[in-house]
């Protein structure tokens, strides 16, 4: 891909921002050691330096194969990822001090493992950028990806709890000492599949409609796919015992549907269906119990976390309350990295990492982190708006929205805004699945932003999902059309 | 497609805005509250930086103390007597709520009470941590031991029950036992998961070992309530020798009252004293109806029925174990007139009449103390970390339930019960003992509850102890005589 004079690549801006991000990570690590050991260890700079080398590697790949990619995405994600590694290392240090052990090595503990996962994730991201030179090519594998996504999403629900359940949510595949969260990958595959499917169906779904109360509603037979996905997400809710995942899958589908059809009626239908379903599940949990009981319990914990019975109950509000108390202890400015007691927050390496961080970096630090997430989402949306093909728009829009929604679901959960669910915090939580999947997601956004910001490529029809170049059919002809409209 | 993309972006912006607003709520508005919340593990660890005060029984027997550990919580709470004192002491777990005296005196035990201000001030200059203050309970270890052993090894095989002994002169609780009980040690383990599991197990146990049956549970008292009806009668001008109507059967408003045994009160007339001695049902049902619901209710209220506010613990701060109110029930028809059938049954302590064992002991104590009702208490003294006395309980009178003349009459009648009547098992050699038995029907086909309330005077004529023993669902009959036997032994131990 050769550069065109006059179009700015902004790669040097990316490099500058990346350097800035790594300085923040290094300062975070240094502060932790100063607080924990009363003096800096001689190797305090090593984790930040290693991360810098890794991100620099990806930066170079981007320079070569995606020169016009959005320059903000990589440094922002690198900052969050770096803070994640540094914070996990900070917890390892606290553990080592508790056990009266010497400082943990650079590659030991969860921090070290996270560093290794970062390396693997960056290789995957670079690989995706290298292999997928044009995002439209992916649409060729849409059905394969869709099927794989559904299977991945279903596996934990089917597996026995001993192989799939962590903290009451069945979202895992645990084999030996190794565990992966297939849903993290499934969501990317499903977005891609939905995007492909909707590009092909958008005209039917958007035009064949009935008007009711001033809103255009789709025909009954066209509701099929939405109903299917809705039922699917409710099954996930009941059998994987996880509201967040259900909300995530259903949310990403409804939003891609809305974006594809430009019909707000889909949003209305989707919201009503989802919250109606959740409310019915809650009522069933209260009266029938059985598979719905878990969700009812969680909703109960959410409604009355400080209730004594909830607090003392096994599987009650203990985790949520300790997270909130950790956040509250941090206050506006936090205790400073290394000066708090994040070990009192349960699951502080995974679900509650944001609460653990909140004690040490305070409201100001968390707000900055929140802005970083928002930047990623906004830049992804901008790529979606800028890119010229419908498939790219839907993929970029869907992925950005999914990422944003996931951040909302987990942060909303630990701050008590919505019922707590077992989602990972993207780029922060320890764990390979989440990190790899989210880096792939970002690589995809960078690939699409490269197409959006770069020079127009010739021949928009790659992948067979572009609209035909010929004259458009008059919309009225689609009224009463068959559901399956085969487009060339 | 760009417009919906922009709108989706706005949706996310709003969602992030919600998170941001919520973070402000938690980290700015609620920050101070959360920072100092008792559940905050940071607060908890700070609490364990210094030893918590010791709780001890009369005579310096330690009931709750500490051992040093080598984990991050530096002191482990230990309850050397285990189950025996569980319902009184409660427990102070690492991350669950404290209950019992551990909760009521938490500020003092943890060293945060205003009473320890001077200690904190001086410790500020010396740089020491202020240790917690010590709590001395009024419980007499001997009496508590006897009560616990006799209750748990009762001869009728009852598995649930409670016993309370009070010093009638002061209101000091001498013994307080609830059966089945729990071992607080399991709940204060520093292994919080094990502690939570122990709590769950106790919480799910059908016998409710964590329910303090002595104060928190009210049950039909049966004939024990006849003491209250007698008090109402004496206040209304009857004397122990007044003749009242009895007979073998009494029908009133649809209720049929019979005596517990055929040979009791067969004559048509019997003295009040004889009626109580033999626990004559027909006599008391007629007497109750004769007096009217208002007088019976008024007498009950004077003895502390319907009091929802009583706590037994620290007389000064008012904190302590919450006592369930004892009730007479409405005894009224829907139009507000007296339901005479209900009144007849209520006069025998059945229908809707409910008392706690503590209330039973307080009735006996009030009679023994000449009608002056003392407020019961558990906390005898508060000692500073250096064992300087900072507080000693000053007995408080709640009210005069009956005149001393009425009290004397009741005493005479109750002594007759133990000397010649249904309560002979409670006799103690060398002491004058009075009391009243009760056998309470409670549910269709269930074994009755056995009750005994009573008091003991020593050879100097001092009221040394008043007691209530309650055994739930006693199989095989004679429920109340076993209660009387245990009551006698408890009073004997308490008098020493």
Image (cartoon, rainbow, N blue to C red):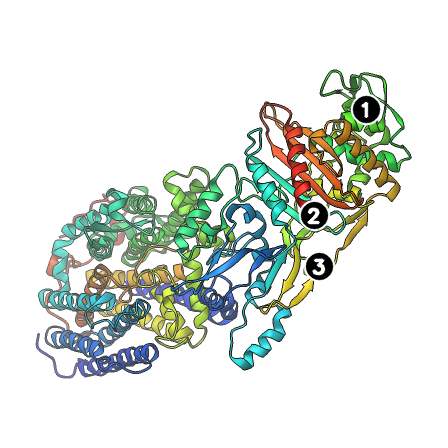
Which residue is at a point 13% across and 53% down the rendered structure image? A488
Quarter location, residue B293: top right
Q: Nearer the viewer, residue A107 or A396?
A: A107
Mark 1–mark 2 CB contact (< 8 Å): no
x and y, in percent, of residue A259 in the image: 29, 59
x and y, in percent, of residue B45 in the image: 45, 66
- Say which label, 3 or 1, has the lower sequence index: 1
Task: From the image, tell me which residue sits under label 3.
Answer: B393
Residue B10 visible, this orientation: no
Task: From the image, tell me which residue sits under label 2.
Answer: B308
In whole angstroms, how far apart are the C-alphas of marks 1 and 2? 31 Å
In whole angstroms, how far apart are the C-alphas of marks 2 and 3? 23 Å
Q: Chain of mark 3?
A: B
Q: Are marks 3 and 1 on the same chain?
A: yes
The residue tagged with tag 2: helix, strand or loop?
Answer: loop
Tell me, for residue B283, which label it has, or none.
Answer: 1
Please rate how many residues cluster around mark 1, counting C-alpha atoms within 10 Å: few if below 14, some from 14 to 19, many from 20.
many
Q: Nearer the viewer, residue B459 or A439?
A: B459
Frontmost of labels 2 and 3 is 3
* Residue B53 drawn above or below residue B442: below
């Amino acid at each position: 891909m050769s550069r065109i004079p006059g179009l700015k690549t902004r790669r040097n801006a990316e490099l500058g921002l990346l350097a800035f991000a790594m300085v923040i990570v290094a300062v975070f690590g240094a502060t932790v050691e100063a607080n924990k050991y009363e003096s800096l260890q001689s190797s305090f700079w090593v984790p930040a330096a290693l991360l810098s080398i890794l991100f620099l590697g990806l930066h170079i790949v981007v320079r070569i194969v995606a020169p016009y990619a959005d320059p903000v995405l990589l440094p922002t994600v690198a900052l969050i990822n770096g803070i994640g590694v540094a914070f996990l290392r900070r917890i390892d240090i606290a553990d080592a001090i508790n056990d009266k052990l010497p400082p943990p090595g650079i590659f030991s503990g969860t921090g070290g493992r996270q560093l290794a996962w970062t390396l693997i994730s960056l290789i995957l991201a670079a690989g995706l950028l290298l292999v997928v030179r044009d995002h439209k090519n992916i649409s060729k594998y849409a059905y394969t990806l869709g099927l794989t996504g559904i299977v991945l999403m279903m596996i934990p629900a089917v597996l026995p709890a001993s192989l799939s359940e962590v903290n009451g949510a069945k979202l895992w595949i645990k084999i030996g000492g190794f565990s992966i969260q297939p849903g993290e990958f499934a969501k990317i595959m499903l977005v891609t599949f939905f995007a492909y499917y909707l590009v092909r169906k958008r005209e039917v779904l958007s035009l064949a409609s009935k008007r009711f109360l001033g809103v255009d509603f789709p025909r009954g037979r066209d509701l099929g796919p939405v109903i299917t996905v809705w039922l699917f997400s409710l099954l996930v809710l009941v059998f994987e015992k996880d509201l967040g995942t259900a909300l995530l899958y259903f949310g990403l589908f409804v939003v891609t549907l809305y974006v594809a059809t430009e019909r707000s009626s889909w949003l209305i239908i989707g919201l009503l269906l989802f919250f109606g379903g959740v409310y019915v599940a809650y009522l069933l949990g209260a009266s029938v119990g059985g598979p719905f009981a878990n969700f009812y319990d969680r909703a109960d914990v959410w409604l009355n976390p400080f209730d004594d019975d909830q607090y003392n109950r096994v599987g009650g509000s203990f985790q949520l309350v300790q997270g909130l108390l950790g956040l509250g202890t941090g206050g506006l400015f936090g205790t400073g990295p290394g000066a708090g007691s994040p070990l009192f927050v349960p699951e502080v390496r995974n679900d509650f990492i944001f609460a653990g961080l909140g004690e040490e970096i305070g409201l100001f630090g968390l707000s900055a982190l929140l802005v970083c997430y928002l930047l990623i989402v906004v830049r992804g949306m901008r790529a979606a708006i800028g890119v010229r093909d419908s498939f790219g728009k839907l993929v970029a829009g869907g992925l950005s929205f999914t990422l944003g929604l996931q951040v909302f679901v987990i942060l909303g959960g630990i701050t008590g805004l919505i019922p707590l669910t077992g989602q990972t915090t993207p780029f922060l939580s320890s764990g390979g699945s989440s990190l790899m999947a989210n880096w792939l997601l970002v690589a995809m956004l960078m690939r699409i932003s490269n197409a959006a910001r770069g020079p127009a490529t010739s021949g928009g029809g790659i992948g067979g999902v572009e609209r035909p170049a010929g004259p458009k059919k008059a919309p009225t002809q689609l009224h009463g059309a068959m559901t399956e409209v085969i487009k060339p | 497609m760009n417009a919906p993309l922009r709108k989706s972006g706005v949706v996310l912006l709003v969602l992030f805005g919600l998170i941001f607003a919520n973070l402000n709520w938690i980290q700015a508005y609620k920050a101070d509250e959360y920072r100092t919340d008792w559940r905050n593990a940071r607060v908890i660890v700070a609490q364990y930086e210094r030893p918590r005060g010791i709780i001890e029984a009369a005579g310096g027997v330690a009931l709750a103390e500490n051992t040093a550990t080598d984990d991050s919580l530096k002191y482990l709470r230990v309850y050397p007597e285990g189950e025996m004192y569980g319902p009184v002491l409660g427990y102070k777990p690492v991350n669950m709520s404290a209950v019992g005296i551990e909760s009521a005196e938490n500020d003092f035990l943890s060293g945060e009470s205003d009473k320890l201000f001077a200690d904190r001030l001086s410790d500020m200059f010396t740089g020491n941590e202020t240790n917690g203050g010590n709590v001395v309970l009024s419980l007499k270890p001997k009496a508590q031991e006897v009560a616990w052993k006799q209750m748990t090894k009762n001869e009728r095989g009852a598995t649930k029950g409670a016993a309370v002994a009070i010093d009638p002169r002061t209101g000091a609780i001498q013994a307080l036992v609830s059966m089945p009980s729990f071992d607080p040690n399991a709940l204060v383990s520093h292994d919080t998961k094990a502690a939570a599991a122990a709590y769950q197990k106790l919480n799910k146990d059908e016998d409710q070992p964590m329910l303090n049956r002595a104060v928190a549970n009210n049950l039909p008292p049966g004939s024990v309530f006849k003491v209250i009806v007698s008090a109402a009668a004496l206040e209304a001008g009857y004397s122990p020798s007044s003749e009242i109507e009895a007979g073998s059967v009494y029908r009133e408003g649809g209720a049929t009252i019979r005596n517990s045994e055929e040979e009791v009160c067969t004559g048509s007339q019997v003295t009040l004293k004889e009626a109580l001695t033999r626990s004559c049902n027909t006599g008391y049902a007629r007497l109750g109806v004769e007096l009217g619901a208002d007088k019976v209710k008024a007498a009950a209220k004077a003895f502390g029925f319907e009091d929802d506010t009583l706590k037994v613990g620290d007389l000064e701060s008012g904190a302590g174990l919450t006592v369930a109110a004892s009730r007479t029930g409405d005894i009224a028809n829907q139009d507000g007139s007296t339901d005479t059938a209900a009144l007849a049954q209520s006069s025998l302590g059945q229908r809707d009449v409910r008392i706690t064992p503590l209330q039973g002991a307080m009735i006996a104590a009030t009679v023994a103390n000449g009608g002056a009702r003392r407020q019961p208490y558990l906390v005898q003294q508060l000692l500073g970390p250096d064992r300087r006395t900072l507080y000693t309980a000053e007995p408080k009178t709640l009210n005069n339930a009956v005149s001393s003349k009425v009290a004397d009459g009741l005493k005479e009648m109750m002594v007759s019960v133990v000397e010649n009547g249904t309560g002979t098992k409670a006799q103690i050699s060398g002491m004058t003992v009075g009391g009243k038995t009760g056998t309470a029907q409670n549910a269709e086909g269930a074994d009755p509850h056995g009750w005994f309330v009573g008091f003991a005077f020593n050879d100097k004529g001092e009221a040394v102890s008043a007691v209530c023993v309650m055994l739930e669902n006693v199989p095989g009959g004679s429920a109340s005589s076993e209660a009387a036997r245990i009551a006698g032994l408890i009073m004997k131990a308490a008098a020493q």
